[in-house]
Amino acid sequence: MPKVIVAISGGTDSSVAAALLKRAGFDVVGVFFRLYDSSGFRGGEKRAKKIAKILKIPIQVLDLRKEFKEMVIDYFLKEYKAGRTPNPCVVCNKEIKFKFLLKKARVLGADLVATGHYARLKQGKLLRAKDKEKDQSYFLWQLSQKQLKRVLFPVGGYIKEEVKILARKFKLPVFEAPESQEVCFEFSLQQNPGPIRYAPPGGAYLGNHQGLAFYTIGQRKRIGLSGGPYWVLDKDLKKNLLIVTKNERDLYKKELTFKKANWVSGKTPKISPKIKAKIRYRHKPASAILDKNKVIFTRPQRAITPGQSVVFYRGQALLGGGIL
């Protein structure tokens, strides 16, 4: 059977992925990514080694703290300081996880790599997972056909409860492990206070904010104004100005533009009213027309946020995405 390199974080999903591949007869080698100095990563490394011992597979630790800081943390902080709301998981998948998994596969002479992502692959198409609540295809839109040809997603055809049952069946002590967090590192931002104003045409001064990096479009809590509720509507970086509104409908827009597009098939899809777009991970895919770098929604969407990813689907297939 082919050799496969599996990224094992110490959590339920990646551990079950490794166990399923071992059961299927693959020659499995585990890899743990040491990305950050924290109790979470140290605990994950211990669990990953324990899982490998139970499954009787070798495991290697890749120390990528330097690369993770340069490619993910520095990007994250730069985007926040620029007034945008970044998506570190998308960058981490492209620049760290799959990049270094495939590098390790070449070194070890492996044919394939695998992760515990909830996604599916079929004939070169990247599909949404069976479990729509856990589906993580949104974070994988920057992957290429060259990469996907060597990737397996063993848990993508299961729902989360089935994966937990499998963990018990394989006698893996991971089903009480904490869920992976979207932001898996600590960060601090310097305060840079400035004025808060009501949305035009009124534009009245309402108070001061702590720094634009601490706020995101659509935010309602922790704005620090009385007489609310208020929602963050926009940010003016040049004037260090936070713009808020009391009318939540102001947050809804029908159009957006995006940049840095990547198409999973390698080709730009044709304009189609049947495309659906997601503007954040927990956003329900919404019907839209894709026109070059513009998206026109059938119905207005709430809190379209610069820095986030917009991801496109046709049916269950992920077509690609871009940066808002």
Image (cartoon, grey):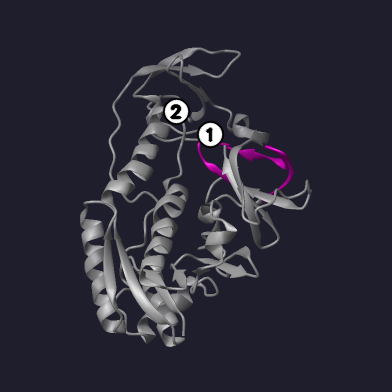
Residue 117 image label: none
Residue at (32% x, 68% y) in the render: 31
SS at mark 2?
Answer: loop
Residue 206 at least partly seen: yes
Residue 174 lies, in percent from the top left, at 31, 73
Residue 234 lies, in percent from the top left, at 52, 25
Residue 283 lies, in percent from the top left, at 57, 49
Depicted 257 relative to depicted 20: above or below: above
Image quadrant holding the C terminus, namely: top right
| Residue 300 part of the magenta-drawn span | yes
Depicted 321 relative to depicted 314: above or below: above
| Residue behind mark 2 | 83
Residues at marks 1 and 2 touching, judged by CB atoms closer than 8 Å:
yes
Disc nearer the start of the sequence (1/2): 2
Left-right relation of 11 to 275? left
Residue at (59% x, 43% y) in the render: 322
Cα separation between marks 1 and 2: 8 Å
Residue at (28% x, 61% y) in the render: 62
Left-right relation of 270 to 172? right
Residue 306 image label: 1
| Residue 238 part of the magenta-drawn span | no
Residue range in magenta is 286-311
Residue at (40% x, 68% y) in the render: 105
The amino acid at mark 1 is: Pro
The amino acid at mark 2 is: Gly
